[in-house]
Every structure is written in structure tokens, then in C-alpha cells.
Image (tube, grey):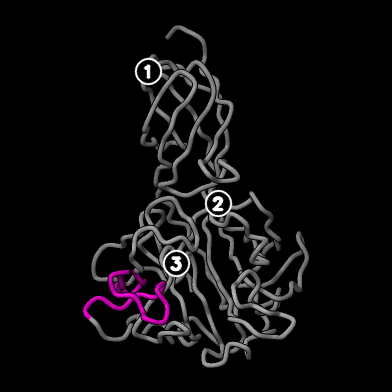
Amino acid sequence: MTGPRPILSKITRPNWPTGTTGTAGDDLVLSGKNFGKTPGAVKFGSTQAQVLTWSDTRITLKVPFRPDNRKTALTFPLLGFSSTNAPIISVFDHFMNGNLAFYKPNDGTVWAFSGEKGTSANPCPADSEAYAKDGGGAFTLNGEALYFGTQKCGTMYLQYDDHTGYDYSPHPGNAAMNRGIAILSAGGGTVRIPNQGTDSVYRNPERFNAIAVVHNNGFETWYLHPRKHLKTDGSSAYAGEAIAEIGCAGLKDCNEKKGVGPYHLHFEVRRIEQVEITVTTAVGLTSNSLSFTYNTPVDPYGWRGKTGDPYNKAINDRLW
């Protein structure tokens, strides 16, 4: 093994504020020098990535899937409700296998944990982002959760394409009544108020007035659109503690001064894992390492479909 040692200097993610966090399937660019002209290997920890292009100073690749069987036990984030009886108006989409781009549909399919799915070929006349069930009929989520349905289209339609969490509406027939309802931490941990560029899924998390809780078991829970935070960044929260109030921050038609808008809680769970990226050249020389954090949305309801889970970014287990 001869020649200069490869130097890995920078990770970037095209069209995104940061390249140091992401999920399986994301496109990344590695910059540096002495990679050589002949492709070698890139590893995320012990997992080898799919290399797309290779030059002496630049490598493009897909972030590899890493099996992660860690689990956690969550409590429900709304007082008086549980995971089985809280009205759901939007589901976690199990069919989002490209670069995640929240609220920017790119595949025309929404696939719920029950195995039921809808496609953009059959949109709701009142809301093109809501898709009718394949084969017709109402979505039931196998009776394991209460599907109220979309606000405009009801239980015959499913939304949203590439949605990374669940939208809950305690008063689904009157969204204004949700305003100010306490949002509870789904577990103990440290409160985080996300800022632009710190997160792998949302380009501007502060736009949604997001608040998160970092748990000590490799998980984070996120709560979007609150009208008010009840905890500060860096403070501690216990399971069931009120950390915010339901609002509609960042959503169109939201007028907080008038108390009018699509008030609801967007709740999601992330699995976090930090790994080291290294480049090994064709002649066997290995670079320095740079840190990369997997920040991957997972479905707390797991997967109950009759076929294999179509979600290829993480293993989904029931966490409630």
C-alpha cells in the first residue's frame, strides 16, 4: 500500500443545509483529496455504502441502511387519550424511500402501518393531497388506531405523501377546540428547540415552532405546530409532563390572533445513531473519519401489513 493517505474534509447533502445528518437512501457528497481514480469503498461504521461516482477529490453515494433493533417505551402525548383512541387525521407514510422532503410528495403513494394504501391516481376532490384507498372503502388501520380521516375528506382518504409522523386532533370536528390543549412529553429526557440546519428532515424546523425531547436511549420525539412552548431549550422533561400547547404554527390558514386555523399536534419519533464515515482507496489506504448522524423517522405503531414493510430507512417496531 503506497501513495498519499486519503483526506476526507467535508460532507455535503445536495440542496440541504447540512450533510452531517440524514437517513438511509439520502444522497451525499464527500469532498477531500487522494481518493484515487479507481473506486474504493466508503463505510458508515461497519456498513458499506453504495458509491455512485468516484474521483480523486469527490465521491457521491447513497447513505446505507443500517439495521437497528433498539426499542423504547413511549407514553401518549395527549392527556386522556391513547394510541388506540386518539383521532388520527394524517398517518406516517411507509412509502418514502428517496431523499426525505417533508410535505413535498415525490412518489404518489401513502401507505399506512395497517398495510392499507392510497395513490395520487385517486385524489380527493376537495384536497388533492389526500388519496383514496386502493380498492375503495374506508381506511380502518386494522382497528388498532382510530382513523378519523382527513379534515376535508373523511375516512375514505389518506394523507400525506412522505409524512414522517402522525397528526392528532382531539376534536376532529372542530379544530379550533384543539387550540391550547397541553402536549405531553412521550418520555423522560432533555428538551430541544430545533433551529435551521440542525435537523435532517425539516429544512426550517423553527417555522413549525417545533419542540423535541431527546431521550437517553437513542430516540427523540418531536412535536410540531405548538402555539406556545412550556419548557426551555436544555431543560429536563419527565414522561407525561406538559411541554407545549397545541397550535397551528407554520400552517396555511393559521391565524393565531383570531384563534382560527387547522389546530392539531404533529407527533413523530426519530431513531438517532452516530457513526464514523471513512474512505478506503482501491490500494487499501484508509482516510481519517468524519461523523455522521442517522436521524431517522420511525413509526411508533410499527408495521402490521400482510406483506413486508415497504419503508426502507429503518426497522419499525410498535413502541406504544
Q: Residue at x 21, y 79 (%)?
A: 135
Q: Is residue 186 magenta?
A: no
| Marks 1 and 2, how far apart at CA | 31 Å
Q: Residue at x 55, y 46 (%)?
A: 16
Q: Secondary structure at mark 1?
A: loop
Is residue 138 rendered to the left or right of residue 272? left
Q: Is residue 55 above or below residue 214?
A: above
Mark 2 or 3: in front is 2
**Dividing the picture into quarters, in which one does residue 242 lie?**
bottom right
Q: Which mark is residue 282?
A: 1
Please tell me which of labels 1 and 3 falls first in the chain. Answer: 1
Q: Which residues are magenta?
A: 111-135
Q: Secondary structure at mark 3?
A: loop
Tell which of 276 and 208 is nearer to you.
208
Residue at mark 2: 200
Mark 1 or 2: in front is 2
Q: Is residue 124 magenta?
A: yes
Q: Secondary structure at mark 2?
A: loop
